Structure formats: structure tokens, C-alpha cells
Image (tube, grey):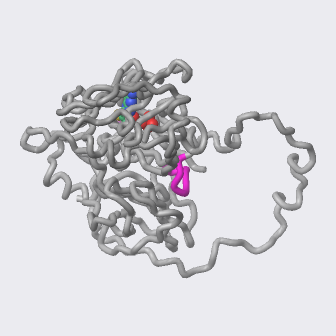
Amino acid sequence: MVDRAETPLNRRRFLSAAGLAGAGLATGALPSRAAEPDAAITDVQDWNRYLGEGVQAHPYGSPSKYEKNVVRRDVEWLTASRESSVNFTPLHALDGNVTPSGLAFERHHGGIADIDPAKHRLMIHGLVDKPLVFTMDDLKRFPGRVHKLYFLECAANSGMEWRGAQLNGCQFTHGMIHNVWYTGVSLRSLLEQAGVKTNAKWLLAEGGDASMMTRSIPLQKALDDCIIAWGMNGEALRPEQGYPVRLVVPGWEGNMWIKWLRRLELGDEPWQAREETSKYTDLLADGRSRRFTYIMDAKSVVTNPSPQAPLLHKGPNVLSGIAWSGRGRIERVDVSLDGGRNWRTARLEGPVLSRSMTRFYVDFDWDGRELLVQSRAMDETGYVQPTKNELRAVRGVNSIYHNNGVQTWFVHKNGETENVEIS
Ligand SMILES: Nc1nc2c(c(=O)[nH]1)N[C@H]1C(S)=C(S)[C@@H](COP(=O)(O)O)O[C@H]1N2
Ligand SMILES: [Mo]
């Protein structure tokens, strides 16, 4: 795995799509080679000669040492402290549509809470008939367990790119997303147990970490599809992801997915917490703020090729990427190799689930010409991912959050790839 962007660069580069010819669909010879004498075959290797490690060498397994570059990375200048910071999923090194637990990006505002599950409680109170407290054992015995695959995207994903191409790698431009399996109970079933009063319209979710993060959630959403989750990819939640229990808010901005969840209060209006007023609102071009932008609109990115995963060979290559939408299933992804002049429809592979990451592929022949690679997602509602300039026309450039514009990668003649924008 090539991993060139150890430190992401700052850049502002605008290219024109003029003069780029499209590369062909895959037609040529397949990537195989004639059988010739090769030391990798004829020499006996050490791993052939000696016994390997026995069972129990690794009671909890980890990846091969040759994959040591496939890690979450942070951007040091982005945040002032490690406790209130973020790292990024290495999207360029992953495939399929499930994010391995150890590579799921982390975003927290007061460090990773170290919670003893035996001492953890979840309280439901406020406008309910009967305030309730649950232990972790109570939650795990609750009838109607659910198991779902959903993406979580931080609203600030791609937020550094509002004024132009900035960070050199899809890990950094798009890596505030993960897509994992959740096990838990529906929030609805717990609320029904407590009995929601008729004047309740909102729900406050509070974390048990040092940041004590709070967000107001419309009651309708809470009753619709939210999950109180303790499981992630078949095992317990990772501490980084909110162990022992987090809120899952499918399709909505990551900030609302309160981790280390300890309290749910029902009320008749939003609480106007810090994270829904001074943060996670969208500053518009005229200086006004748009609040409560909950849904993460359709978005996609080509993960290969990308700056950390350049093209290494002429001839057949597999272009790959991911698409997702907070409004439902991904319907279609189109890919351009010439900066948006010509488009071809990508092949969606693996399960295409509502509000879950979807993998796409395009097989193509690269003749060594420069490429401007883009992808554009469409979801089942017919919504089409906008270009960055279309977004700026509505939102201006003072925004941080909710940037779902089309990404462009410039592939040089030598295969190296960089983050650019087309003017
Ligand atoms: N208690 C608590 N919950 C939290 C946060 C936090 O700092 N504390 N950060 C939020 C933000 S901004 C995001 S984007 C997601 C990140 O989830 P992850 O760490 O699983 O990627 O958690 C959200 N839930
Ligand atoms: Mo976030």
C-alpha cells in the first residue's frame, strides 16, 4: 500500500478541464504476466522453511505488520488539543462498505471517557409518565433487539475545503466518516416504556464524558429510527466510539450521535445547546446562520486513485470509491475522468442499504494521460450531489459544515495524484 501523505499539505490549486481527453473503458490485455524464472517462486522463502507462531500468540488479533501504514491519522495544526480533536479513517486503504472498528475515525471534545459498564446508567426523564433508569444489563435484556449498518459522517467532513483544495488525501478530505454495524434497542421501545407525554416534542441526549455533550433531537426522529447501541461490528463498542453505549441517529450529522450516553430528557422545545448554536450551524454568504441542518445529503468520493493511492501502472486499473446519503439508498454513481465533460455510470457492489455507505467500481484502461477524476452520487429521492461551485452559490465560503460538493483528483502523467479544483 503506497502511503505518501504522512503529512497533508496546504494547497490552493485550480485547474481547467480543457485539453484532457477521456481515458478508455477497459478493453486491453488483463494484468497478468508470462511465466518466467522468478526468485519469488524458485527460491525457498523463510515462511516456507520455518514454523509460524502457534495459536494464542495473539488472543486478540491485529493486522499484518506489512499493513502498518493503514492507520487513522490526525492533522496536527487543525485542533489545539488532542482531547478535543479528530482523526481520520484511511479511506484510500479500505474496500467494501464496512469500516474496521480499529480504523473508524474518532471525534471527541473531552477525551475518551473510561466508563465501567457496571457503574453506567441511562436515565430517561422530563415529559414522561414514568422516569426510568437502565443498567447495561437491563438494556441488553430489552426485547426487540436491532442490528443495522449505518454511516456516521461528521458535519465538518470536507469542511476545510470550502475555499479551495486544501488537504492532500481522501483520508483527510473525506475521512470523518465510518460505516459500521450497530447492535442495540430502538429508542422508541425505551420511550414507550417510559410513556411520552403528549406535549413532548424534543429530546435532549447527554454524554457521560468530560465534555458532557448535549444535543436536542426532534421527538419524531427519536421515535422513527434512532438506536441505543452497545454493539459495533459484532462486538462491544470501542471506547473511542462511546463504550458502553451511544445514540445512533441514522442519516443525520455525526454530532447528534451522543457517545457515552447517560441521559435522555423529554421537553417541548430545543435546548439551544452549544453544539447546536455556536457550533454545527451553517454560516451563509450574507452573514446569517442556518441552524438545525440535520440530514447529511448525498455525497461520494473516489478513494482509488487518490493522493495517498496514486496510479502505479498503465493499462487496466480499478477505480473505486464510496457514496452515501442521509435520505436513503444510493441510486446511482457517475464517474468522470476528464473533469466532468464525460460521465460513465459506476457499478455498485455489495449491499446497497438506506443511509449506509455504498461501494462503487469502474474498470478502466489508463494510457498515461493526465486525468481529472470525479464522482457524483444520486440517491433514491433523485437528489444529485452538487459541484462545489453550485454549493458556494447558495452557501458562500464562510461555512464549515455540510460540504458535500464533488471532489476532483488530478492524476499526473507519472500517476501521482493531487487534490485540485476545476475553475
Ligand atoms: N459524548 C460525546 N458524544 C459525541 C461527541 C463528543 O465529543 N462527546 N462528539 C460528536 C461528534 S462531533 C461526532 S462527529 C461523533 C463522532 O463519532 P465517532 O467518534 O464514533 O467517529 O460523535 C459525536 N458524539
Ligand atoms: Mo462532528
> Seen from this angle, which residue lies furthest left?
286
Q: Is residue 252 above or below residue 137?
A: below
The answer to whether residue 246 is above or below residue 144 is above
Q: Identify which residue is drawn at 36% across, 39% down.
A: 192
Q: Answer above or below: position of 13 versus 135.
A: below
For residue 124, side relative to residue 36 (left or right): left
The structure residue drawn at horizontal position 67% and vertical position 42%, both measured from the top left corner, is: 63
Residue 85 visible in the shown view: no
Question: Residue 394: image x %, image y %?
Answer: 14, 52
Q: Nearer the viewer, residue 112 or 422?
A: 112
On whether residue 93 falls in the magenta region, the answer is yes
Q: Residue at x 28, y 69 (%)?
A: 18
Q: Within the magenta stretch, is there residue 192?
A: no
Quarter-wise, where is residue 196 in the image?
top left
* Residue 387 x/y as whole percent: 25, 59
- Which residue is at the front of the view, 115 or 222? 222
Secondary structure that dominates the magenta span: loop
Q: Quadrant of the C terminus?
A: bottom left
In this picture, which residue range is highlighted in magenta? Answer: 91-99
- Whether residue 107 sits left or right of residue 381 in the image: it is right
Measuring from the top left, give residue 397's x and y in whole percent: 18, 44
Point out the residue furthest to the bottom here: 27
x and y percentages locating residue 311 in the rendered image:
52, 60
Rendered view: 337 above or below 260: below
